[in-house]
Image (cartoon, grey):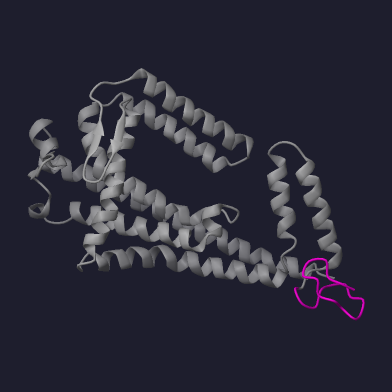
Amino acid sequence: MRCPKCQFDHELQTTECLKCGIIFSRYQAALAAKQAALAAPGPLASAVAFEAAAEDVPDSTARADSLRELKCRILALPLALLAAKLVAGTPLRLAAGMLAMMLHESGHAITSWLTGRWAVPMLWVTMHGDDRSWAIVLCLAAAIVFMGYLAWQADRWGWVLAAGVALIAQVTFLSLPAESTIVFGGDAGAMVLATILMAAFYLPRQSAVHKNWGLRWGLLAIGALSFLHVFLLWTGPYEELPFGEIEGVNLSDPSLLTEMYGWSVTQLVDRYVRLGRMCLVALLALYVWGLVSAYLELRRSPAREKQRP
């Protein structure tokens, strides 16, 4: 008998493949479920197809994958942050600073969009408009709602929640003083975006990020290096804060906030540090959730093995 999955030719009739380990009856049922899922309309199709594909994986392989994922979730985030802290004390911190700068300028741009202003992030500077455009406000709100609708149709509830948070953030930012908020959004945005990059490590197994090993670990490393570079700056000595003028650009962000918008140095540092700690608390909650979910998945693996004929 020839295995329908790996094409290994068995001399004797068996109930499971001696090479890849699939159970023939389950494999045929999985193929039928996949065909039904492809023919089914709506968001149910993707979920059924994923569950059917999971049946193709031998139980021993599924358990090994679950155990590997649990080990990764135990070590990945703490080691990434520890390595980033060690890098901050070496000449490699310049590379971390370049990564943080890209997130910094992206933070300025995203803050500008949320306040209804056009913005173009570039290296070292972000060009943005001075006046609010309600066309930008409506276009951004429509894009967020549309993405949330697509996520709802696909039963991606995490993305639905993200769209809701983005819509609330837009409404909140529209009520804040735009100029100082955009300036503050540089390092603030860098920490938030770095946190999001690290959180991408915990995306579901069927996501493109999880399936791509290099992308998954690369985003984690970039996020950790960028976050620690900014956070350690604001938790360090006041003497090392980047006050002054950036040659050929303008005053630095801290100088703009203190000299033009009346923030005290204490307020400035406290707001950045408080935001950084909030990001760390969110990462801690995500870390604990990741461990619990991976452990429960591992616990369910032996139950599948006991059901094998």
Q: Which residues are magenta?
A: 1-20
Instruction: Report the side of 305 relative to 88 (left or right).
Output: right
- Residue in the image at 47% along x and 67% along y: 74
Is the C terminus in the top left, top right, bottom left or bottom right quadrant?
bottom right
Q: Is residue 289 left or right of residue 233?
A: right
Quadrant of the image containing the N terminus? bottom right
166 to the left or right of 34: left
Say if 132 sits above or below 99 in the image.
Answer: above
Q: Indicate whether residue 14 is drawn in magenta.
A: yes
Q: Quadrant of residue 133?
A: top left
Q: Is the magenta region chiefly helix, strand or loop?
A: loop
Residue 20, position in %: x, y? Answer: 75, 73
State the residue at coordinates (80%, 57%): 30
Residue placed furthest toward the top: 134
Name the image quarter holding residue 306: bottom right
Please state the horizontal and vertical placement of residue 259, each as a whole percent of the image: 7, 35
* 146 part of magenta stretch: no
**Count of number-bearing discs:** 0
Residue at horizontal 25%, vertical 61%?
Answer: 95
Q: Quadrant of residue 268?
A: top left
